Image: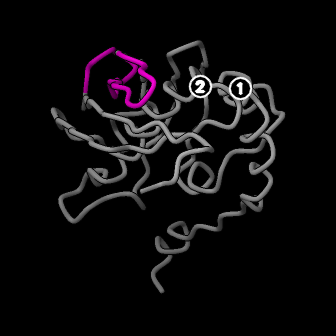
């Protein structure tokens, strides 16, 4: 093994996602999302894996910070678009979650992403900022931008979300 490969190892620890089952059922979406910022809840597993951190939570809007790393690279030498899509989808979904009452969920129904600039380690930290555009009783729309520290947009996305109520049959 090359000496430089020693620095190319990663160990990830996460909590059992079952810890979220009760709070997501009993807390309004805004309070649930604020729980990540104030330390009431640990980050979910995918956020631990990617090193995503919450920055802000407001009604209809959230922001996450993300530090690009080499282990996320595609063969093209930049962060894989799928990882950037995860960040944008999360920002849009979580922004919508802030508008929901306790026990009501959502899922992404449609997602469109535009990649404008590559994201690399040299880019430095980027923020995924999501906003609700429309919060309906059955569907919602949201958008998000991936911004570097200088405010340059590296990617942007729109999403349609489907509201999942506990009484729906799921068909």
Q: Main secondary structure of the magenta part?
A: strand
Percent position (x, y) of residue 171? Answer: 41, 57
Percent position (x, y) of residue 31? Answer: 74, 23
The numbered mark, 1 or 2, whose residue comes first in the sequence reads 1
Q: On screen, 114 above or below 137? A: below
- Which of the two residues, 107 or 147, is positioned nearer the viewer here? 107
- Which of the two residues, 125 or 144, is positioned nearer the viewer here? 144
Q: Report the residue at 41% width, 21% height from top.
A: 136
User: Which stretch appears magenta?
Assistant: 134-153
Question: Which element type, helix, strand or loop, lies under badge 2?
Answer: loop
Percent position (x, y) of residue 18? Answer: 76, 59
- Which of the two residues, 161 or 76, is positioned nearer the viewer here? 161
The numbered disc on residue 28 is 1
- Is residue 146 located in the magenta-colored stretch of the structure? yes
Q: Report the residue at 32% width, 24% height from top.
A: 143
Q: Report the residue at 69% width, 45% height from top.
A: 43
Percent position (x, y) of residue 160? Answer: 31, 34
- Which of the two residues, 155 or 137, is positioned nearer the viewer here? 137
Instruction: Name the residue tied to disc 2.
Output: 100
Q: Residue furthest bottom?
A: 1
C-alpha gap between disc 1 and disc 2: 6 Å
Q: Report the residue at 50% width, 17% height from top.
A: 61
Report whether 147 appears left or right of 105. Answer: left
> Can I make out residue 144 in this image?
no
Do the residues under discs 1 and 2 have CB atoms within 8 angstroms? Answer: yes
> Can I make out residue 90 in this image?
yes
């Amino acid at each position: 093994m090359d000496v430089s490969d020693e620095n190319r190892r990663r160990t990830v620890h996460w909590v059992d996602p079952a810890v979220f089952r009760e709070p997501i059922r009993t807390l309004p979406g805004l309070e649930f999302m604020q729980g990540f910022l104030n330390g009431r809840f640990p980050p979910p597993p995918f956020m631990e894996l990617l090193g995503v951190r919450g920055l802000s939570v407001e009604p209809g809007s959230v922001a996450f910070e993300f530090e690009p790393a080499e282990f996320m690279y595609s063969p093209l030498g930049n962060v894989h678009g799928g990882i950037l899509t995860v960040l944008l989808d999360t920002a849009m979904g979580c922004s919508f979650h802030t508008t929901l009452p306790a026990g009501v969920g959502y899922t992404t129904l449609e997602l469109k992403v535009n990649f404008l600039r590559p994201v690399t380690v040299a880019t430095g930290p980027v923020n995924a900022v999501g906003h609700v555009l429309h919060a309906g009783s059955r569907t919602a729309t949201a958008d998000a931008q991936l911004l570097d520290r200088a405010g340059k947009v590296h990617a942007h996305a729109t999403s349609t979300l489907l509201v999942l109520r506990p009484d729906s049959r799921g068909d």
